[in-house]
Structures are given as structure tokens and as C-alpha cells.
Image: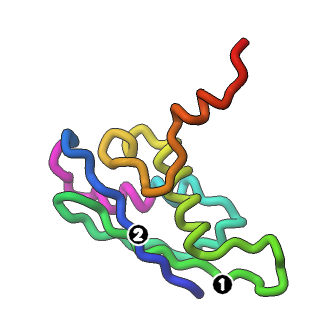
Amino acid sequence: MDCVYASLRRRPEAPPAAVGEAAEVVGILWAHTTPKDGLEHISGSLHSDRVDLLLYFLSPDPTSPAAHSPLHRAAALLARGHQASPALKRRYLPPAGAPCPQAADLRRPKA
């Protein structure tokens, strides 16, 4: 099993953190997990400027050339959850390295 530490930084304009917000973030991430993520457990800790997360993943199969590292899987999950969740978008900045939604729009061919 591999453990990845990650944080989501709170937006400066976001309202103060509410009781239970760390559990809500964990629930949102679980809702956007796929089987190929290999996620086993998440724990969260809330701070005034961020939420800290510990994500536990099954170790990748070393014989599989397509297996992604735990860091890659954590980054993909955080980006997927942030992109899909209005609550995460409203409260937290996009995770570092997350694709910019406007960049995706620029790559789309114009009709």
C-alpha cells in the first residue's frame, strides 16, 4: 500500500470552514473514485487555509507497463473531484497541476 499526502488550498474569498467540511471533501473524492485508482482509504484534516488529505492506494502492479504511480493517481483523483464538484470549486483552488478548464475550451474546434 502507498500513501500520498496532498492538500487543497482554500480560496481567499471562500467562507470560513464549517464543521464536517473535511468529511464532505473525503466523501466528494470517494464519489469520483474509479476502480483503476486503486484507492483504499482517505483521511482529511481541516485547517483555516486548506484541507490536508492522506490517500492510501494499492501498490501498482510492477509487471503492468500501464500502471500509474500513486502520485499520478492522487493528482488525477483530486483534479477529477475538483472539476466535477461545485462545492470543491467554490471553496478550494484547483489542485496544483490540474488542467485549466479554459485550456480545454481553447483546444476544442470552433463550430
Label 2 and label 1: CA atoms lie apart by 17 Å
Image quarter of residue 13: top left
Q: Are marks 2 and 1 in contact (CB under 8 Å)?
A: no
**SS category of the residue bearing label 1:** loop
Q: Which residue is mark 1?
A: 59
Say if the magenta span includes residue 18.
yes
Q: Amino acid at mark 2?
A: Ala
Picture disc at residue 6: 2
Q: Residue at x 30, y 62 (%)?
A: 51
In which quadrant is the N terminus drawn? bottom right
Three-letter amino acid code at disc 1? Ser
Between residue 106 and residue 35, name the one nearer to us. Answer: 106
Q: Residues within 10 Å of mark 1 (few under 14, many from 20)?
A: some
Of 10 and 29, the residue lying toward us:
10
Q: Residue at x 42, y 75 (%)?
A: 5
- Horizontal side of residue 96 vs 34, given as left or right: left
Q: Quadrant of residue 27?
A: bottom left
Helix or strand or loop: what does disc 2 sit on?
strand
Relative to residue 98, is residue 65 depicted above or below? below
Q: Quadrant of the C terminus?
A: top right
In the rendering, at what x and y percent does residue 42 appear?
46, 72
Magenta residues? Answer: 15-27
Indicate yes or no whether the magenta region holds residue 17.
Answer: yes
In the depicted structure, whether residue 33 falls above or below residue 15: below
| Image spot of residue 47 (x, y percent) | 20, 64
Of labels 2 and 1, earlier in sequence is: 2
Left or right of 105 on screen, residue 14? left
